Image: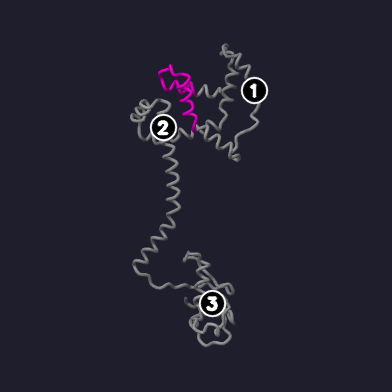
Amino acid sequence: MEDPNNDTVQVRDADGQYCWVCFATQDEDSEAEWVRPCRCRGTTKWVHQSCLQRWIDEKQRGNTTTSVACPQCNTKYIIVFPPYGHVVYIMDLTDRMLYKVCPFVAAGVVVGSVYWTAVTYGAVTVMQVLGHKEGLTVMEEADPLFLLVGLPTIPIMLILGKMVRWEDFVLKFWRRHCGWLKLFSGSVSASSSYYEQPPTNGFSFSDPISATRVLCGALMLPTIATVFGRVFFNSIPSSLQRTLLGGIMLWYV
């Protein structure tokens, strides 16, 4: 610890000294080193070297680059460390680099984990909808860049499709052009009174139950549609057609 005023760093056999950190006097601890590290005058200028170092450590909280000043005169303490060896210098430099890099590494790990989870989910969904062999064939013949970009969008589109009430727009379009669809006009008119009413319980992320229900429902939709297609439309040879029919049946149910 250096003194900005170039005063005597160690003072012995002085009267009226007491440490402003621990409030101990010269008589209570005659072997302690006393320092005058700031511009304070009077009795507050004295402090134990060990007490001052402990007080500075508490203020810095492990960050040695944090500047600390005297609480009375606001003089900044000039802290001089002993010369580092090569090993200590390398370890300290490594610790500082890790302190700065670790948040970015952690964020990259989280984002990468979410991304590859979405890629895996997209690949499994393709194999469920198209069939195991057909799905593998399609993904093997596709461009790898297209797969890396397209597969993660599958869970995103499912979640967005679950959040947006797209069926209301489909039914409005259906009713508007129901003159072209005479065969379905009766069913549309019967259900029009129900869908004309706005939904009473809209989706909101502030409701954790609603958010988890939408998330789980969106991600489980391909699996449930595949199961419905195999159970009710097993006679259809195409796996894609069975899944689409199972999804339509699930939507009406």
Q: Nearer the viewer, residue 54 or 27?
A: 27
Q: Identify residue type, mark 1.
A: Tyr
Tag 2–tag 3 contact (CB < 8 Å): no
Q: Identify residue type, mark 2.
A: Val
Instruction: Give left or right: position of 231 versus 200.
Output: left
Local crowd size for mark 1, using a 10 Å CA cut-off: few (<14), some (14–19), many (≥20):
few
Local crowd size for mark 2, using a 10 Å CA cut-off: few (<14), some (14–19), many (≥20):
some
Which residue is at 33% across, 29% downward?
Answer: 141
Q: Nearer the viewer, residue 251 or 77?
A: 251
Give the structural element (helix, strand or loop) at label 3. Answer: loop
Q: Which residue is mark 1?
A: 194
Earlier sequence position, callout 1 versus callout 2 = 2
Local crowd size for mark 3, using a 10 Å CA cut-off: few (<14), some (14–19), many (≥20):
many
Which residue is at 48% across, 21% downward?
Answer: 245
Query: Is most of the magenta stretch helix, strand or loop?
Result: helix
Closer to the observer: label 2 or label 3?
2
Q: Identify residue type, mark 3.
A: Cys
